[in-house]
Amino acid sequence: MGEDFIYIMEHGTDVLTPFSKQLMDAESGLSYEEPSPNTFSFNSPYGTCPACKGLGKLHKADMDKVIPDDSKSINEVGIKPFGEVRSNMTFKQIKKIAKHFKFDLDTPIKKIPPKALEVMLYGGESSLGIDLGYSPHDMVYNLASDGIVNMLERWYRDTTSEKIRNWAEEFMTIQNCTECDGYRLKKSSLFFRVGGMHIGQLATMDLDKLYDWFEDIDDKLSDRQKAISKDVIKEIKLRLGFLLEVGLNYLTLNRPTRTLSGDVLDMSVEEATEFFKHIPAIYRKLTTLNSVGLGYITLGQQATTLSGGEAQR
């Protein structure tokens, strides 16, 4: 077949066996790029999930906020994003949908024909557009094509107006990205596994459990894999070991940085000196505090709690 891919049929059988020099699954046809460090970084376009842009979360419309009380009608603001009835394109469209599906704006939301409600929420009925009256005449406002749910998510995602984004956010909730399951990496990055685990799963493990996993990983590796990974695993265990020594066994590698401040502030200067030894600017300042005998105070200790002698030092 060419391009580093070939099928071979064994003599006397009708069984085709695929062979490829590329990283490709012959059954699904899914191919993979040659992995590099960027493949496993959600900060890189080569590794980040395209759906959530590496955030692991998506703002999605929350139906409990869009329709908080389905006993109310549209006239009673039963579908909150529509707001109060007024003379605009949205309500011209809604009235056209109501006429088409034979209900009125006083009908409780729960009694609106399911197809009509689906059209208003999720679209899919492009034939019910409203002519905007502009030139060219084929320009239409089409709630029925897009649906208010899709509009909310698009406005939140694409608008440059902070006011519109804040308004749309009132009807949304934060959910795990369904494309990457919250792991922040594209699917192909998560197909690479060691010992049955991909990097996203390892990042969710408590550090003590992660250390144990690396302790036992040799049993799951071939001799060749052991030779390749020996130095890397040694360095990982060294760094994890230090974090465990300073009592951070409950942390996970995917924990947001903004939530770590309390843990760091509870460290003594002596502990923090070791913790920040790879960050020269911080390390030098902490070393100075240690040298004048203040290794026992915590980083979060207020200056007003120090004795006169400590403050002078």
Image: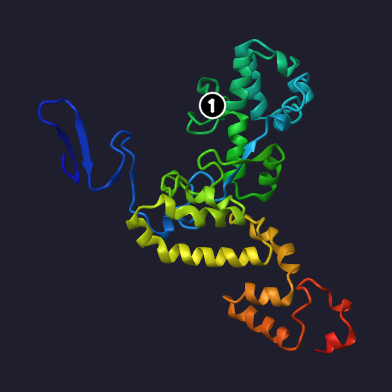
Relative image position of residue 6 (x, y in whole percent):
18, 39
The percent position of residue 225, horizontal first and vertical second, equals 36, 56
Q: Give x and y (percent) for residue 172.
A: 67, 38
Percent coordinates x, y for residue 22 in the rendering: 26, 47
Residue beneath the point at 77% across and 24% down: 69
Q: Nearer the viewer, residue 78 or 94?
A: 78
Q: Residue at x 43, y 55 (%)?
A: 218
**How many labels sit on residues?**
1
Q: Does 284 sit above or below residue 252?
A: below
For residue 201, above or below residue 241: above
Where 252 sits versus 122, above or below? below
SS of the residue under disc 1: helix
> What residue is drawn where x is 62% and y is 65%?
243
Quadrant in which the C terminus is drawn = bottom right
Where, by quadrant of the figure, is residue 288 drawn?
Answer: bottom right
Q: Is residue 223 visible?
A: yes
Q: Residue furthest left?
A: 11
- Decide if residue 42 is in sight here: no
Task: Tell me if 213 is positioned left or right of 37 in this view.
Answer: right
The quadrant in which the N terminus is found is top left
Residue type, label 1: Ser
The residue that mark 1 highlights is 145
Q: Is residue 75 left or right of residue 14?
A: right
Other-residue count near label 1 (Cα within 10 Å), few / some / many at <14 / 14–19 / ≥20 = some
Location of residue 267 (image quadrant): bottom right
22 or 155: nearer the viewer: 22
Q: Residue at x 58, y 33 (%)?
A: 150
